[in-house]
Image (tube, rainbow, N blue to C red):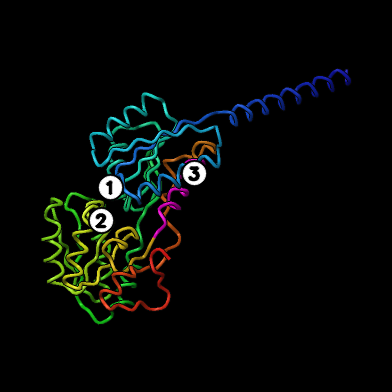
Amino acid sequence: MKKFISIMLAAAVALTAFALCACSDSKQDKTFKVGICQYYDSEIYTEATNGFTDKLKEKYGDNVEITLKKAKGDADKCDTILDGFVKDKVDLILANGAPALLAAADKIEKIPVMATCVHDFASTLKLGNKSGVTGRNISGTSSAVPPDAQASMIKELFPNVSTVAILFSSKNSDSKSQSDALTEALQENGYAVTAYTFANDADIADVATAACSENDILFLPSDNSLIQSSEQLAGVVLKSRTPTITSDEKLCAECGLATLSVSYYDLGTTTANMAYRVLTDGEDISQMKVESASEFTKKYNKEMASSMGFDPPEGYTAIGE
């Protein structure tokens, strides 16, 4: 009898081990389908997409199928792209850019949605709290640079000026959120701050000219309209000799003087690591806190600095070097 029980126990253990192994192999062999909706077809958003795809391929190898679709600034295209992802039964969606996130939030209820290149998730999604947890099938990474750090950099570079203009598109809720946060931080440092908005790209140069003529410093948040009009802005700030601080390195390289830079590629890899935790580890995305960049670099535009006779203090790196 004891021998029979021992045999049965051994068989049960073997079956359990086989089942666990089979489950493990099944999970390991599963190919995940991931769809990327990239709203803006510009460098910083592409860098985030590249970081995301590179990291997922590193983690999954051939066990991940990634489909990239670009909306090229068209909200209607976002809807079409997302409908296609639902039809294809993707396992996860990356919404790259605040408009892509908004479109996904309106249409996608069950598929996990990771987002990146979004400044303020709470503001974009109109959440009632700032906890960093959406409580929905949405999480991701914020591209926000801490406003107090930006204000401190402006204070470090220009301690003896008093007025700052913030220029952004009135159609961009993400930029409005950046402006509000930075305004509060600058006011705490003793600056008078004025927001200047434009409704159409054709108005940017005129509004920027007014902002520069009426203030000591111009600040440009992350705003795709500004990036697309960077050549016009460069002409305005050079003519007025207005020191211009930007939220991202790309914009600074085109028309700015200095920036507190975040790596959008690294932001994408962080988002991919979060996606892995959802897909493979089974983490609940609705309780996953939105993450941010952990490191920022002080950089300056060497050509602009030379044109304005600006000598950056120690600790600033020239863009491209």
Q: Residues within 10 Å of mark 2 (few under 14, many from 20)?
A: some
> Helix, strand or loop at disc 1?
helix
Q: Position of residue 300 (x, y in %)?
A: 35, 69
Residue 247 in which image quadrant: bottom left
Task: Report the residue marked by disc 3.
Answer: 54
Q: Amino acid at mark 3?
A: Asp
Q: Residues within 10 Å of mark 1 (few under 14, many from 20)?
A: some
Cα distance, mark 2 to mark 3?
30 Å
Task: Report the residue marked by disc 1.
Answer: 124
Q: Residue at x 35, y 43 (%)?
A: 96
Mark 1 or mark 2: which comes first in sequence? 1
Q: Main secondary structure of the magenta part?
A: helix
> Helix, strand or loop at disc 3?
helix
Q: Residue at x 28, y 56 (%)?
A: 222
Image side of residue 138 versus residue 229, left or right: right
Say whether marks 2 and 3 touch (CB < 8 Å).
no
Q: Amino acid at mark 2?
A: Ser
Q: Magenta residues?
A: 262-277
Q: Position of residue 315 (x, y in %)?
A: 43, 74
The C terminus lies in quadrant: bottom left
Mark 3 or mark 1: which comes first in sequence? 3
Mark 2 or mark 3: which comes first in sequence? 3
Determine which of the numbered discs, if any, sits on residue 177 in the image: 2
Q: Nearer the viewer, residue 238 or 267?
A: 238
Q: Amino acid at mark 1?
A: Thr
Image side of residue 192 versus residue 279, left or right: left
The N terminus lies in quadrant: top right
Image side of residue 98 versus residue 60, left or right: left
